[in-house]
Amino acid sequence: MSNVIDILDLSVEDIDGLINVACDIIENPDKYAEKCKRKKLATLFFEPSTRTRLSFEAAMYELGGNVIGFSDSNNSSAAKGESVADTVRTVSCYADIIAMRHPKEGAPLVASMATNTPIINAGDGGHNHPTQTLADLLTIYREKGSFNNLTVGLCGDLKFGRTVHSLINALSRYAGVKFVLISPEELKLPDYVTNNVLIKNNIPYTVTTDLSEAMPQLDILYMTRVQRERFFNEQDYIRLKDSYILTPEKLISAKEDLAIMHPLPRVNEISCAVDNDKRACYFKQALYGKYMRMALILKLLEVE
């Protein structure tokens, strides 16, 4: 494996190995403090990011490496019309590994074809966000101890949410996983995900518009933002938006060991009053993303 463009580039064995390394990093950080000494990570972020970019940078620094790159395409030669392939070929002269975010779906795949330097997709449009999925998987593993036999509720924008699509792809490979798809009709999971992943692999799933009704059966609740701009009709947005705001009241019927997750940024879809609930995992999720990116950098650079 030389690149990670899609979560399916990683086998179940790859993911289990990354989780084992990440857990070892958590327990023994000093052991890894110079693993990437004299190595350079380039962060090529053609669209804005807070958690993903800073998480990659923190990961490389904590491995003893260095970081170069840009956080805005206007600060790069892309603003002059340079192609993604040419940018990557040039940056490959200076860096050992590249993390790339781009608004166009498929751009990291194009980049990977232009260089032998390992490329990590840090998000491409509404398509893939594999390292967010790795953060999600480590969170689930640390909270539940296993990926098997979980009922996973996905709530909010299931149509455009790249994190949701990647997580379904990843978890569908484990035994006994069931999905509850909670969204307004306008933002339901795309047919290509339903047909090509859930139905094709005989993964049990239910569809509902009612978060409260689904709550008692869930082991994981993965919240996403219902975005006003995705609705053609303002009245539909107003009618539905409060249905998908998680409050302490909506958690009364939830399991005691429910794990509440969110890829962040949060706007108003999880009440701040939920932050103090012991089941809230979304800030831990952001931290676990750093450890999984450390493990992935080590794997792609073939550092023992």
Image (cartoon, rainbow, N blue to C red):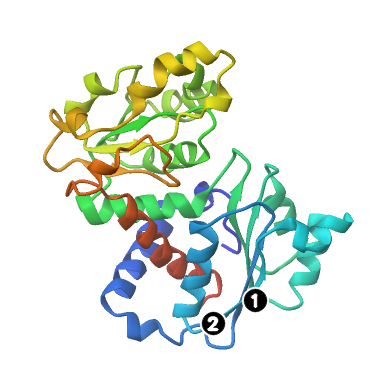
| Circles 2, 1 touching at the beta carbon (< 8 Å) | yes
Residue 115: give x, y in percent of width and height: 75, 65
At which x and y percent is residue 176? 26, 35
Q: For the point 22% across and 52% down, which residue is it?
A: 143
Apparent side of residue 109 relative to residue 59 in the rendered image (left or right): right
Residue type marked 2: Gly
Quarter-wise, where is residue 240 in the image?
top left
- Answer left or right for 29 relative to 64: left
For residue 227, side relative to residue 274 (left or right): right
Residue 156 lies, with reference to residue 219, above or below; the image says: above
Which marked residue is nearer to the observer: mark 2 or mark 1?
2
Q: Residues within 10 Å of mark 1 (few under 14, many from 20)?
A: some
Q: Is residue 150 above or below residue 137?
A: above
Q: Is residue 226 left or right of residue 46?
A: left
Residue bearing mark 2 = 65
Q: Using the image, determine if residue 49 lies above or below residue 21.
A: above
Dot 2 or dot 1, earlier in sequence: 2
Q: Which mark is residue 36?
A: none
Which residue does the image show at 50% across and 49% down from the upper left? 7
> Mark 1 belongs to which amino acid?
Asp
Toward the viewer: 89 or 224? Answer: 224
Q: Secondary structure at mark 2?
A: loop
**Which residue in the protein does label 1 denote?**
96
Q: CA distance from mark 2 to mark 1?
A: 10 Å
Rendering coords of residue 62 (x, y %) = 44, 79
Q: Position of residue 295 (x, y in %)?
A: 43, 69
Residue 140 in view here = yes
- Give the quarter of the image for residue 3: bottom right
Is the residue marked by circle 2 packed among few (<14), some (14-19), or many (20+) residues within 10 Å? some
Quadrant of the rendering where the N terminus is positioned:
bottom right
- Secondary structure at badge 1 equals loop
Say which residue appears at 39% left-offset and 57% top-offset.
286
